[in-house]
């Protein structure tokens, strides 16, 4: 759907419904939390007579900076979703929506910037060229200046989503429109010093974890950097799965390692089950989503993920990534 048509159709549905339920993907990152929370704040301020909630099954410790509280699907009575409009942000496929009751909703809108793999919405506004879903919500907010009221709190959620999903405006995909959206959000009077403090200050214990991860980094023959984080390591530093998984970002600035991967062992608290392994793949200059797809995962060209049955499969993923990097380097010797 073209953007102008999508924006118009989405606004029409929002005006039509009195009840709006917003969800995002499981294991929320800054963009999932920011786009859903920001949209909620935007709609609440703009339509005070409507009921607007964010409803998700899981929570993230990193969501302290977001001001919108979330409801669990189980808290809502039988039949609640029937006359509600559901808006799902930042979620490519229906199996990753953090709300198993979304299909009960009267009408579903999907707003997403991932590759267009599943159109589970009745309206699907998908732009895989946008660097974050929060940017899309900012575009939506700016398209209806007379109808929509962006509070500094909602703008802070969206700005956080943009900043985190673009690696502070560094990733490929950041373009003039991204900065336009950021400028629009900054215009609402948000306090960026506070946002950056929330995002980038660590507890000393987390620095010790970083140090342990740095110590355990390995390289394949062609330079794929990787770490394996066993449950015991999580326990040693008292970290939950999400915080431990941030390890992937510690590997991003190694010269010659154009692909880097964190393997994080899942505990019994993970839906995939104890002993399975979460894989977080990242790259620069070349695409790695095909490697994730081979193992049943997906994501973006340069930031993808998958879940392995067990740690034995790690060797296979590394062999695939190493081969890919070797081939790439053989014809791109100048890229570091
Ligand atoms: P992550 O490393 O979890 O931040 O994921 C990077 C990207 O890959 C995100 O866009 C995720 O939505 C996507 N992704 C991660 N794991 C999976 C999976 N098992 N299946 C499909 N997409 C995934």
Image (tube, grey):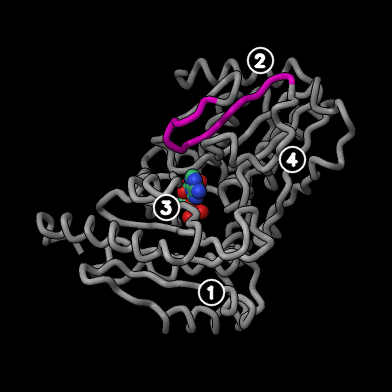
Q: Is residue 120 above or below residue 274?
A: above
**Could you tell which of marks 1 and 2 lies nearer the N-terminus?**
2
Q: Residue tagged by mark 2?
A: 12
Number of the label disc, if any, that sits on residue 54: 4
Q: Helix, strand, or loop for circle 3?
A: loop
Earlier-in-chain disc, 2 versus 4: 2
Q: Is residue 111 magenta?
A: yes
Image position of 316 (left or right of 167): left
Extreme right residue here? 77
The residue lying at 62 percent from left, 25 percent from top is 109
C-alpha distance separating marks 3 and 2: 32 Å
Instruction: Tell me if I can see residue 254 in this picture.
Output: yes
Quarter of image, res 85: top right
**Which residue position holds label 3?**
169
Residue 180, compared with residue 334, is above or below; it is: above
Q: Residue 17, relative to residue 265: is it above or below?
A: above
Real-space Cα distance between discs 1 and 4? 33 Å
């Amino acid at each position: 759907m073209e953007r102008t048509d999508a924006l118009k159709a989405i606004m029409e549905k929002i005006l039509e419904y009195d009840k709006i339920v917003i969800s995002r993907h499981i294991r929320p990152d800054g963009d999932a939390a920011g786009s859903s929370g920001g949209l909620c704040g935007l709609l609440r301020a703009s339509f005070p007579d409507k009921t607007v909630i964010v409803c998700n099954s899981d929570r993230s410790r990193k969501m302290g900076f977001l001001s919108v509280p979330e409801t669990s699907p189980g808290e809502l009575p039988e039949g609640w979703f029937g006359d509600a409009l559901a808006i799902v942000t930042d979620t490519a496929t229906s199996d990753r929506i953090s709300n198993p009751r979304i299909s009960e909703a009267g009408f579903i809108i999907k707003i997403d910037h991932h590759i267009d793999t599943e159109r589970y919405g009745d309206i699907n506004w998908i732009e895989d060229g946008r660097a974050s879903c929060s940017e899309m919500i900012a575009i939506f907010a700016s398209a209806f200046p007379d109808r929509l009221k962006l509070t500094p709190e909602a703008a802070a959620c969206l700005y956080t989503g943009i900043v985190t999903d673009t690696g502070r405006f560094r990733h490929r995909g950041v373009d003039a429109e991204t900065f336009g959206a950021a400028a629009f959000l900054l215009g609402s009077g948000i306090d960026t010093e506070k946002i950056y403090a929330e995002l980038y200050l660590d507890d000393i214990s987390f620095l010790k974890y970083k140090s342990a991860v740095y110590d355990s980094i390995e390289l394949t023959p062609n330079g794929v950097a990787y770490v394996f984080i066993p449950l015991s390591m999580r326990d040693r530093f008292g970290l939950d799965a999400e915080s431990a998984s941030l390890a992937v970002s510690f590997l991003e600035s190694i010269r010659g390692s154009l692909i880097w991967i964190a393997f994080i062992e899942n505990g019994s608290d993970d839906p995939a089950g104890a002993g399975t392994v979460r894989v977080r793949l990242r790259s620069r200059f070349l695409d790695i989503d095909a490697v994730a797809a081979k193992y049943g995962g997906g994501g973006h060209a340069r930031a993808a993920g998958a879940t392995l049955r067990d740690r034995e499969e790690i060797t296979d993923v590394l062999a695939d990534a190493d081969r890919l990097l070797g081939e790439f380097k053989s014809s791109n010797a100048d890229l570091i």
